[in-house]
Amino acid sequence: MSAALTLGGPDHLEKLLPLVASFHAEEGITSSEEDRHAGVAPLLDGNPYGCVYLIGPPRAPIGYIVIAFGWSVEFGGLDAIIDELYIRPGVRGRGIASEALIALPRALAGGGLRAIHLEVDKTNAQALKLYQRAGFSVRDNYMFMSKRL
């Protein structure tokens, strides 16, 4: 099984939306089909605020990564947050997510990216191990916080 990354485009929308719905259901995220479409379609259409990478063969992806771009004075320029990372349950545990997380910086490096961030449930030991293996580390004294608008 390959963790090859393909930059998503408009023609990938119908393959991607069921994966997003599965991820949201698995994580207990309440979202409508319209919300998922509104969140994904602009990124596939080239919106400069983010992008989607399909994991595996583009005709039958086994997962996806959503990246949201931002700017950081601390990190000296363009940064990104991994907003969502999903691998189909039937192919988990084969190193696909690790491969994808290792390939991701290479895919984004040409665009001048200085840092990649992510949010993880502190109680999810498996996810913590995965992210640490891929080179992510906890920043002492920092906590990701949100305010819904």
Image (spheres, rainbow, N blue to C red):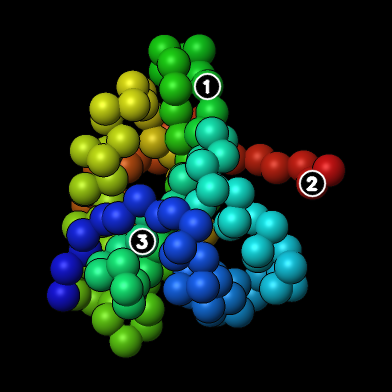
Confirm or deny contact between disc 2 and disc 3 (CB under 8 A).
Answer: no
How many neighbours does mark 3 have within 10 angstroms: few (below 14), some (14-19), or many (20 or more)?
many
Q: Quadrant of the N terminus?
A: bottom left
Q: Give the mark toward the camera: 1 or 2.
A: 1
Q: Which mark sits nearer the N-terminus, 2 or 3?
A: 3
Residue 147 sits in which quadrant? top right
Q: CA distance from mark 2 to mark 3?
A: 27 Å
Q: Position of residue 85 (x, y in %)?
A: 43, 60
Q: Give the mark toward the camera: 1 or 3.
A: 3
- In the image, 69 versus 117, the foreground residue is 69
Q: Position of residue 104 (x, y in %)?
A: 28, 45
- In the image, 70 versus 46, the foreground residue is 46
| Label ID, residue 45 | none
The amino acid at mark 1 is Trp
The amino acid at mark 2 is Arg
Q: Quadrant of the C terminus?
A: top right
Residue labelled with disc 1: 71
Q: CA distance from mark 1 to mark 3?
A: 24 Å
Whether residue 83 is situated above or below residue 63 in the rendered picture: above
How many neighbours does mark 2 have within 10 angstroms: few (below 14), some (14-19), or many (20 or more)?
few
In this view, the residue farthest toward the right is: 149
Look at 21% across and 48% down and name the residue there. 102
How many neighbours does mark 1 have within 10 angstroms: few (below 14), some (14-19), or many (20 or more)?
some
Q: Which mark sits nearer the N-terminus, 1 or 3?
A: 3
Q: Is residue 134 left or right of residue 47?
A: left
Look at 50% across and 19% down and name the residue there. 72
Residue labelled with disc 2: 148
Q: Give the mark toward the camera: 2 or 3.
A: 3
Q: Secondary structure at mark 3?
A: strand
Residue labelled with disc 3: 54
The amino acid at mark 3 is Leu
Confirm or deny contact between disc 1 and disc 3 (CB under 8 A).
Answer: no
